[in-house]
Image (cartoon, grey):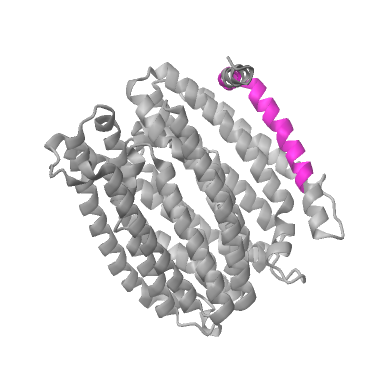
């Protein structure tokens, strides 16, 4: 493994994500302050709809980037160039499909935003602005993936993150000066154009030789790429139906006002999750290169380490989130009257849902790195359909049984059931069978034990948290309590996993040697 690039990719990604986390929170705070929580909900709805439309991406990026690993390792520039040219053509088509589908969706916007009429916003113009900003990103996606395939994820992270920093800065200034939702969304177009220019320049400087090669893809490679694209298309549909359906269902069946409150919780959660996922995703290309020539036994040991590491990181961050989220909402977004707070049951199921999804990261990392996404290509369709059906059903069931306030809980419970009964069973089975070449029984025992232990800790932390007069003081005290509980869980997991102990000792030994100057 190229450890220097691995660490550089992870460090740059995490550093920028922290900055972007602060920026996204500030932008949301200014939206609520200057144009209202209702528009905040509308903005979240647009983001979810765009997520649905992005299914047209078909998983092209992951599929072709995976196919680039071996020719890059073998120095086959002609083959890499052919894949890049195919990638460029496909993404231009995808961008056009998303734009056309987006225009079609505009006719259904009044039905997707249940209570939009009181917002005093042109939903057609504002959605069109967001649509254009997204379509622009497909014009340079091929060059982004080319850079990533060479394990230089830190470069694309710097470009995209700098673009978002620019976007956030412009949006805050526009909100203060104009209080216009239209100009707020126009800032996304400006930032996307800047990222496009920067990516074009850097890609041509570093990989101009690849871009200039006029090479066509051979029949065998085209067949492999087509096979992988079909598989990733299935995965893309499942991910969209699970990850974006909740917000659309809440908006359509409950309303954009509630969606605005809910999105405040999920914005912080999503920003945190995207940050900690960066302990994994920047390593995809590095692990992909490693798997080209490694023994299955070595790959299994790396995977076991990452699975336990997955739990340790998840326990720390998600228990911490649950302990402090209500106080964070009060401090960051609320005017002090608690109007934007949702019931504790909502934050409980949000935390549990995202933790359960996060526990898939090690499996997804090695799936993408080893290219086994074809073997479970039908799983996402069942996953997505089940999630949508259960979510709509549970909106009515929970609302009838427990009141309207619990309708949101029903939507999230549906996603939890879907993840536990499909994703956490099928994905590891496929990885172990086709990549690790062994049974997944030990994984299932350990994985569901991790989820059960976390769930028990989540229930138990309710009896440990303190109520205080100051939100800031309560946040600090309860956050420390959560960290203490998470540290105990993490220590137990680390001591129980032999592969984790093995790599931890190796890392500690190398660090000690460097400190001694050896």
Q: What residue sits 54% from the left and 25% below the top? A: 305
Indicate whether 433 appears above or below 53. Answer: above
Residue 396 shown left or right of residue 195 in the figure: right
Q: Is residue 479 visible?
A: yes
| Residue 480 painted magenta | yes
Residue reaching furthest right? Answer: 469
- Number of numbered discs: 0
Q: Position of residue 272 (x, y in %)?
A: 59, 49
Q: Is residue 60 visible?
A: no
Q: What residue sits 20% from the left and 53% below the top? A: 89
What quarter of the picture does the N terminus occupy?
A: top left
Q: Where on the picture, by quarter, is residue 107? A: bottom left
**Magenta stretch mostly in which secondary structure?**
helix
Point out the stretch of residues depicted in magenta. 479-505
Residue 513 shown left or right of residue 122 in the figure: right
Q: What residue sits 50% from the left and 77% below the top? A: 181
Residue 92 shown left or right of residue 5 in the figure: left
* Depth check, front residue: 177 or 426: 177
Q: What residue sits 58% from the left and 31% below the top? A: 309
* Depth check, front residue: 428 or 273: 273
């Amino acid at each position: 493994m190229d450890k220097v690039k691995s660490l550089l990719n992870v460090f740059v990604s995490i550093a920028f994500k922290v900055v972007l986390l602060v920026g996204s929170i500030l932008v949301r705070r200014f939206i609520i302050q200057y144009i209202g929580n209702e528009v905040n909900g509308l903005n979240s709805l647009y983001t979810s709809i765009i997520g649905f439309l992005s299914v047209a991406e078909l998983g092209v990026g992951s599929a072709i980037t995976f196919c680039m690993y071996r020719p890059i390792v073998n120095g086959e520039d002609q083959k890499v160039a052919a894949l890049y040219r195919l990638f460029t053509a496909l993404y231009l088509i995808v961008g056009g499909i998303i734009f056309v589908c987006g225009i079609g969706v505009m006719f259904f916007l009044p039905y997707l935003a249940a209570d939009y009429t009181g917002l005093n916003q042109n939903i057609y113009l504002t959605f069109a602005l967001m649509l254009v900003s997204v379509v622009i990103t497909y014009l340079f996606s091929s060059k982004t993936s080319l850079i990533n395939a060479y394990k230089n994820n830190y470069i694309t992270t710097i470009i995209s993150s700098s673009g978002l920093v620019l976007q956030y800065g412009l949006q805050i200034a526009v909100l203060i000066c104009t209080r216009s939702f239209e100009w707020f969304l126009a800032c996304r177009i400006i930032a996307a154009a800047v990222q496009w220019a920067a990516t074009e320049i850097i890609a041509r400087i570093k990989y101009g030789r690849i871009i200039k090669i006029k090479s066509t893809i051979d029949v065998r490679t085209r067949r492999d790429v087509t096979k992988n694209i079909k598989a990733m298309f299935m995965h893309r549909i499942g991910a969209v139906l699970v990850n974006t359906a909740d917000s659309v269902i809440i908006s359509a069946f409950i309303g954009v006002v509630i969606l605005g409150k809910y999105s405040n919780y999920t914005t912080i959660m999503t920003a945190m999750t995207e940050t900690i996922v960066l302990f994994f995703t920047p390593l995809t290309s590095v692990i992909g290169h490693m798997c080209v020539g490694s023994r299955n036994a070595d790959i299994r040991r790396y995977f076991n380490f990452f699975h336990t590491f997955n739990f340790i990181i998840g326990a720390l961050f998600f228990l911490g989130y649950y302990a402090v989220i209500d106080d964070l909402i009060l401090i960051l977004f609320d005017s002090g009257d608690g109007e934007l707070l949702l019931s504790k049951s909502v934050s409980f199921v949000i935390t549990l849902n995202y933790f359960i999804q996060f526990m898939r990261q090690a499996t997804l990392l090695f799936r993408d790195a080893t290219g086994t996404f074809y073997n479970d290509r039908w799983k996402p369709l069942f996953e997505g359909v089940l999630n949508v059906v259960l979510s709509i059903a549970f909106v009515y069931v929970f609302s009838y049984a427990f009141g309207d306030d619990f309708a949101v809980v029903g939507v999230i419970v549906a996603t939890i059931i879907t993840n536990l009964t499909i994703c956490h069973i099928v994905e590891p089975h496929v990885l172990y069978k086709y990549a690790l070449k062994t049974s997944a029984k030990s994984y299932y025992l350990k994985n569901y034990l991790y989820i059960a232990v976390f769930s028990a800790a989540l229930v138990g932390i309710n009896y440990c948290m303190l109520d205080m007069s100051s939100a800031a003081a309560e946040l600090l005290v309860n956050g420390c309590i959560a960290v203490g509980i998470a540290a105990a869980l993490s220590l137990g997991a680390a001591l129980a996993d032999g592969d984790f102990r093995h790599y931890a000792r190796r890392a500690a030994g190398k660090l000690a040697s460097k400190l001694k100057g050896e």
